[in-house]
Image: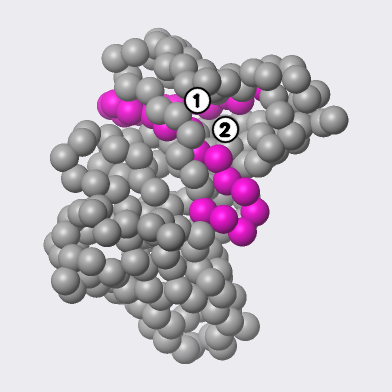
Amino acid sequence: DQQVKQNSPSLSVQEGRISILNCDYTNSMFDYFLWYKKYPAEGPTFLISISSIKDKNEDGRFTVFLNKSAKHLSLHIVPSQPGDSAVYFCAAIRSAIIFGKGTRLHILP
Amino acid sequence: DTGVSQDPRHKITKRGQNVTFRCDPISEHNRLYWYRQTLGQGPEFLTYFQNEAQLEKSRLLSDRFSAERPKGSFSTLEIQRTEQGDSAMYLCASSPQGVPNQPQHFGDGTRLSIL
C-alpha cells in the first residue's frame, strides 16, 4: 500500500503559467514533507520542504502548501520555466524518506 | 566536486553473478542511505547507516543483499546471486546528523541490468 501518492503521472503547463503538483498521504504520523526534482540520468535533487506544524513554505518561485486535515500537499511553481521540466517526487519522512511515484512536468514553450 | 559519488554508473551482469556498488557520501555527512528505484516508481528505501552503524533495513533488503560502511565514510552495497528482478537504479544519499529532518543529498545512482 502506498503511503505517499501522486495520482497524476504527468502534467503539461505553458511557460510563464503556474504549475501545481499534488500529493496525498495516508499516515498522519509523518512530521515532515519534501519535494524532490529529478532530471534524466541524475539523482533526485532537494527542492523544498515543509514541517507538519506549518501550512505553507515559500522559496522563490516554489511554494508548498500543506493541508493536514485532508492529508494533502501541493507544490506551486510560478512562473513556470523550461528548466522546470523534470520529474517531481513528493516525499514524507518517518525514519527514512517515503517517496511517491512522481509526476512528470512538461513546460510548453 | 563535493556531492555524493556513486560507482559504477552502469553495471550489466548475468543472472546469478554477484555485484558490488560503492557510494562516497558528502564528507561531513554522518548518515548514509541506500534506495532502489524501478521504472515508473519513486525511490524505495533499502537501508541506512549512522556513521558505521546500520540502523534500519527495509523488508525489501533480502538476505542476498548486504550493505557495509566499515569506517563510517564510504559504503558498499552487494547483491549476491543476482536475479532479473534486481534490475533497477540503486541510489545512495547522505545527510548530516543533528538537524532534524535534514534533506538528503542523492548521488546519480548505479543502473544495474541483469541479463
- Which residue has dot 2 on it? A6
Q: Residue at x 66, y 34 (%)?
A: A84
> Looking at the image, do the residues carrying marks 1 and 2 touch, with CB atoms under 8 Å apart?
yes
| Chain of the residue on which disc 1 is drawn | A
Q: Earlier in the sequence, mark 1 or mark 2?
A: 2
- Which residue has dot 1 on it? A24
Q: Residue furthest right?
A: A109
Quarter of the rendering containing residue A26: top left
Query: Split into 4 quadrants, where in the image is the N terminus of chain B?
Result: bottom left
How many residues crowd around disc 1 within 10 Å: few (fewer than 14), some, or many (20 or more)? Answer: many
Give residue A95's position: percent from left, percent from top: 25, 42
The residue nearer to you, when weighing A1 against A73, is A73
Quarter of the rendering containing residue B27: bottom left
Three-letter amino acid code at the position of disc 2:
Gln
Task: Tell me which segment is drawn in magenta.
Answer: A19-43
How many residues crowd around disc 2 within 10 Å: few (fewer than 14), some, or many (20 or more)? Answer: many
Element under disc 1 = strand
Query: Split into 4 quadrants, where in the image is the C terminus of chain B?
Result: bottom right
- Inspect the magenta stretch and tell me whether residue A41 lies in it: yes
